[in-house]
Image: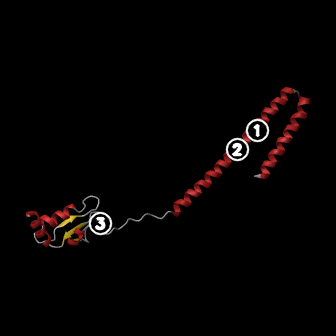
Amino acid sequence: MDNEENLEGMMGEWLEYAETNLSSSDGEEQAKERKKENVRKKRNDQQNQDKEKDKETEKEDNEKEKEKEVERPEKKQRVGKKTSSVWDHYTMLPDCDPKKPRAACNYCGTDYATDTKLNGTSTLWAHVERKCKKCPFSDWVEQSKKQ
């Protein structure tokens, strides 16, 4: 870059020297035209240099973005622990569709949809508390309701 700047400076000095020396012999109008042309050339050169710099910075930015993309590990889906105590009364069915999980009651074998986002544990609780006749827990609930 320093060499290019030195070269541009030298060219600018030479052009000014040429303009001053030639303007006295050719006439003022031709000298003005040459000056205008030189100014246009300088402006075009500067614009070209700016475009090249922009391209270089754009390439560097693209390379940095690619590096960032490579560094990010893929997000893994978390497999959470079943926190509700209702899971003591149910077992997950292994042969069902993984996108639509199901669980069976440990006492009567009735199965329910158990997708955490769609179904939740409400239906499981309702079955254990009210519907399942074989569940020892349901007797305790009925007695507490009578009191």
**Left or right: 15, with 53 as reference point:** right
Which of discs 1 and 3 lies nearer the camera? The answer is 3
The residue lying at 84 percent from left, 45 percent from top is 10
Mark seen at residue 20: none
- Quadrant in which residue 120 is drawn: bottom left
> Which residue is most to the left?
146
The residue lying at 78 percent from left, 34 percent from top is 37
Q: Are marks 2 and 3 in contact (CB under 8 Å)?
A: no
- Amino acid bearing label 3: Pro
Near mark 1 (Cα within 10 A), the count class, few <14, some 14-19 or many ≥20, is few
Towards the viewer: 117 or 9: 117
- Amino acid bearing label 1: Lys
- Distance Cα–Cα, label 2 vs label 3: 59 Å
Mark seen at residue 98: 3
Q: Tell me the residue that label 1 is attached to.
A: 41
Q: Residue 68: image x %, image y %? A: 54, 60
> Which residue is most to the front?
147
Upstream in the sequence, badge 2 or badge 1?
A: 1
- Quadrant in which residue 136 is drawn: bottom left
Relative to 128, does residue 16 appear above or below in the rendering? above
Relative to 107, does residue 60 appear above or below in the rendering? above
Near mark 3 (Cα within 10 A), the count class, few <14, some 14-19 or many ≥20, is few
Q: Tell me the residue that label 2 is attached to.
A: 48
